[in-house]
Image (tube, rainbow, N blue to C red):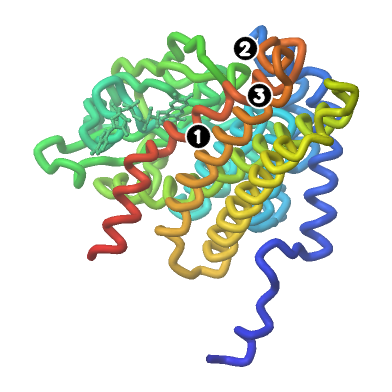
Amino acid sequence: MPAGDFAARSLSSLSEDERLFQTNVYLFADREVRPLVRDMDEHAKIPRDLIDKLFDLGVMSIEIPEAFGGAAGSFFHAVLAVEALSRVDPSIGVLVDVQNTLVINALLRWGSDHVKHHYLPLLAANMLGAYALSETGSGSDAFAMGTRAIEQADGWAITGRKLWITNGNEANLFIVFANVKPEAGSRGITAFLVERGFNGFTVGKKEDKLGIRASSTCELLFDDCRVPPANVLGEVGKGYKVAIETLNEGRIGIGAQMIGLAQGALDHAIKYIKERKQFGRSIAEFQAVQHQVARAATELEAARLMVYNAARLRDEGRPFLTEAAMCKLYSSEVAERVTSLAVNLFGGNGFVKDYPVEKLFRDAKIGQIYEGTSNLQLETISKQLLR
Ligand SMILES: Cc1cc2nc3c(=O)[nH]c(=O)nc-3n(C[C@H](O)[C@H](O)[C@H](O)COP(=O)(O)OP(=O)(O)OC[C@H]3O[C@@H](n4cnc5c(N)ncnc54)[C@H](O)[C@@H]3O)c2cc1C
């Protein structure tokens, strides 16, 4: 084994730059996001002003090179940002997550020179992105999509309907997957870059959700939507690769969202149990309560190490498929357990909207659904083990 391998840092140790970045993002979240959390949840809306501030902070263009106006950071930086923001509001966490780990990530990896020169500066400045794969009939079985693209003399015409698209309400650029040759099955799937203003494209119904309510989730409608030839992302017929490989990385970001929100719930619970008195003492003095909190913190630490490890592997260019699936599976389960405990520890106050943990409990549920349900993560993991 090369000597360098022994010099590896502990999983949770951060470089000076990473620590400063994490602190800055958390301080921003505490100052700019926290006061808006309840209102954003109630009105199911993120103010544009807050999105602009996220652009100013540099967290909307983390991996974009400086030459295109980005922050020239790593994937690990994106994970730190999503975690820090989700500790305050997982809806803001996922907005930033989709922009970085799905949209920008896919453009950096698959975009032509033209695509990079045209769109990366816009994404770094103020353009929000979305990633449109799912449809009514194709969720887990994503490649059974019904959306079609037909080649025209001057580009492509897309017709179909996408469902559940995060950032749909605010985004200006959509990565849209459509099949150009249905008889070829998944080998006909192609990724297209569609701007909000393109003819034949409209954003439809916005979903009224259980959790991450401020994050918009929309239907997209394509009726002979015209897309220029230069807006094919990657190769025609290779969209399945764009979809799979981007989501493999993206789910590490969902892991980061889950550990962030679990940490937020634990922070609230620890503060509350020290203040709340029953039987003449603070409830934090009861050993049963102390042990519950200790178990939650232990599980959260394990989930964080898994998320950080998957992100580091990805940045090192090493295989990370199994670790990414494991970190999303486990961190979403931990988030559900930790937020549920936080509700319990708040007692009746945990069940009402005047206190913050009820919302985080609702927000946690999505981690087991999007970017591949828990069953699908188990499929990925077992396939790797049994091949
Ligand atoms: C809030 C929200 C935001 C989203 N954002 C996006 C987005 O930005 N872009 C996007 O493209 N999509 C997005 N999605 C869609 C999301 O990725 C899908 O909902 C998810 O992949 C599950 O698909 P489905 O809803 O069709 O469920 P189904 O695939 O119908 O699954 C239903 C149940 O069956 C199980 N199941 C299905 N197949 C199998 C199998 N082979 N083995 C075992 N169990 C199985 C599942 O695990 C699940 O429990 C979002 C969804 C939500 C709710």
Amino acid type at mark 3: Asn
- Mark 3 or mark 1, earlier in chain: 3
CA distance for labels 3 and 1: 20 Å
Gap between marks 3 and 2 measured at Cα: 26 Å
Q: Position of residue 350 (x, y in %)?
A: 69, 17
Q: Which mark is residue 64?
A: none
- The residue at which mark 1 appears reads as 367
Sequence-earlier tag: 2 or 1 = 2
> In the image, what residue type sits under mark 1?
Gly
Q: Quadrant of ligand 1?
A: top left
Label 2: element kind: loop
Give me the residue at 74% from left, 31% from top. Answer: 88
Label 1, residues with CA under 10 Å away: few <14, some 14-19, many ≥20: many
Lower sequence index among marks 3 and 2: 2
Indicate left or right for 374 with 73 as reference: left
Image depth: mark 3 or mark 2 in front = 3
> Which residue corresponds to mark 3?
344
Residue 239: percent from left, percent from top: 31, 45
Picture quarter containing residue 3?
bottom right
Amino acid at pointer 2: Ala
**Drawn side of residue 81 relative to residue 75, left or right:** right
User: Where does residue 166 sit, x and y in percent of width and height?
Assistant: 51, 26
Dot 3: element: helix
Label of residue 44 in the image: 2
Establish whether ligand 1 lies closer than 8 Å to the Cβ of label 1: no
Q: Quadrant of the C terminus?
A: bottom left
Q: Nearer the viewer, residue 21 or 182?
A: 21
Q: Which percent across, then down, holds residue 115? A: 50, 46
Q: Distance between the Cα atoms at labels 2 and 1?
A: 18 Å
Mark 3 or 1: the one toward you: 3
